[in-house]
């Protein structure tokens, strides 16, 4: 037993520094692994941010283009409708002016007592 105890003591004394060195190395490795994981996480965040930026930029350009096209379409439609309204207004004004002139002539003839028919009959096509 004495030899066995001596061997155990020798193994224990010899293994203790090895275990301590292994624990130190494990701590060191853990620090390196943490640093590597932090670096990987930083790269992932950077990549995600860049992707988001590019997608937002593309979406903004698309929205701007569609807004521009929609605005041009509305402007074209409004321009066309304005021309139609202007033409209809001019036609209506011309017709109203003709009717006003004819009726004024009639009233003038009534005032002076002229019984002859008006020279410009009402034209319903105008």
Image (spheres, rainbow, N blue to C red):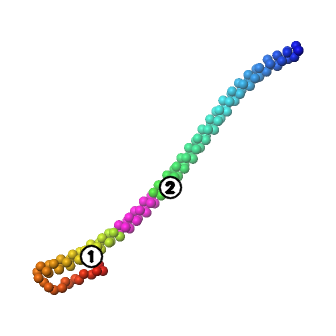
Q: Is residue 18 above or below residue 78?
A: above
Q: Is residue 54 above or below residue 109?
A: above
Which residue does the image show at 82% across and 16% down from the upper left?
9
Residue 31: % across, % down: 66, 29
Which residue does the image show at 24% across and 77% down from the upper left?
98
Occupied quadrant, residue 107? bottom left
Q: Nearer the viewer, residue 87 or 8?
A: 8
Quadrant placement of the N terminus: top right
State yes or no: residue 103 in magenta: no
Residue 59: % across, % down: 51, 52
Q: Nearer the viewer, mark 1 or mark 2?
A: 1
Residue pointed to by mark 1: 95
Which residue does the image show at 13% across and 84% down from the upper left?
114
| Residues rendered magenta in the picture | 68-83
Occupied quadrant, residue 101? bottom left
Label 1: which secondary element: helix
Quadrant placement of the C terminus: bottom left
Residue pointed to by mark 2: 62
């Amino acid at each position: 037993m004495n030899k066995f105890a001596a061997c155990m003591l020798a193994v224990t004394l010899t293994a203790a520094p090895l275990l301590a060195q292994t624990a130190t190395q494990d701590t060191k490795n853990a620090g390196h692994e943490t640093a590597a994981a932090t670096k990987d996480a930083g790269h992932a965040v950077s990549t995600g941010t860049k992707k988001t930026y590019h997608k937002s930029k593309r979406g903004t350009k698309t929205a701007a283009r569609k807004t521009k096209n929609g605005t041009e379409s509305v402007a074209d439609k409004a321009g066309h409708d304005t021309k139609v309204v202007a033409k209809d207004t001019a036609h209506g004004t011309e017709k109203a002016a003709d009717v006003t002139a004819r009726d004024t002539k009639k009233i003038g003839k009534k005032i002076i007592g002229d019984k002859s028919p008006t020279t410009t009959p009402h034209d319903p096509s105008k």
